[in-house]
Amino acid sequence: MSNHSHHHEAISNNIGLVFFLNLSFTIIEFIGGVLTGSTAIMADAVHDLGDTLSIGLAWGLSRLSKQHANDEFTYGFHRFSLLGALINGIVLVMGSAWVLSEAIPKLLSPEMPHAQGMFWLAILGVTVNGYAAWKISGGKTLNERVLNWHLIEDVLGWFSILIVSIVLLFWEWPILDPLLSIAFTLFILMNVIKNTYQTIKLFLQSVPDNKLLDEIRDKLNALQHVSNVHHIHLWSLDGEKHVLTAHLEIDQMVCANEQKEIKENVHKALSDYSLSHTTIEFELPDELCRDK
């Protein structure tokens, strides 16, 4: 098995470990939220429940995405990983909206939570989520990056709860609890919407990186015997594996050996980019482009 395959297998196993960690800790959070009476902890519990469902789904889709291409899915199953990222984003947007609907009314009648219980639960939260974020930090697909961002958000959220719990141990300011819930949820919502927007763009086959497309076009245009590059398309299967197609206009009639040399030059020009699938078509002088 190649190092690349070992890497993906390790990432898949890590997602599975993170799923079971999150599931176990989410149950602890709900119990702790009830016992401490903390809106912030309950808000994070709901957020973690969404994360747990999303991670479980991402785990399954991640394993499915590693299957080989077939006659029905000729590009393989990598796009299923992108589907996981989209579902993750939708779940978190819905969960965040629910948390806001629960936390905002608490501003009018805040209740003092059990600060000591919040403190120890926050210590556990920072530890568990920090370990989970570290285990999945090596992922490169959009799906894996979204999951890692979720876990980093959880670490920040629990660190905020830790700070608030310390304040509440010395001062009776119960309004800090719903304020933290709202601030944390708005922060999450802002980043989730950004990632979900990027995922939707990839689903619609937008260019994953405009700078990358410009660089590729310039390199192809600079090749000997290439007079023009058109019908150049760059899209992504999962945020990591990109697909490129292009038409290259050749400035003179060339023999088979010269065509082979041009192909080798194209290969060298594109070797710096991690392109999973590449299709290049040559158009000789006075040859009509069949896609016009």
Image (spheres, rainbow, N blue to C red):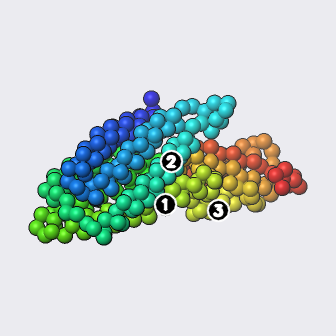
Instruction: Name the secondary structure under disc 2.
Output: helix
Looking at the image, tell me whether mark 1 or mark 3 is earlier in sequence order: 1
Looking at the rendered image, the quarter that the N terminus falls into is top left
Compared with 23, 201 (above or below) is below
Could you say which is closer to the camera, residue 156 or residue 257?
A: 156
Quadrant location of the C terminus in the rendered image: bottom right
Mark 3 lies on residue: 218
Q: Which mark is residue 132?
A: none
Distance between the alpha carbons at the discs numbered 1 and 2: 12 Å
Among the 4 quarters of the image, the one containing residue 189 = bottom left
**Residue located beneath label 1 in the image:** 193
> Which of the labelled discs sits on residue 87, or is there none?
2
Q: Residues within 10 Å of mark 3 (few under 14, many from 20)?
A: few
Q: Position of residue 68 (x, y in %)?
A: 57, 31
Looking at the rendered structure, the secondary structure element under dot 3 is: helix
Horizontal and vertical percent for residue 184?
A: 34, 63
Binning the other alpha carbons within 10 Å of mark 2 as few (below 14), some (14 to 19) or many (20 upward) gives: some
Give the percent coordinates (x, y) of residue 60. 46, 36
**Who's the residue at 59% across and 57% down the image?**
201
Compared with 137, 227 (above or below) is: below
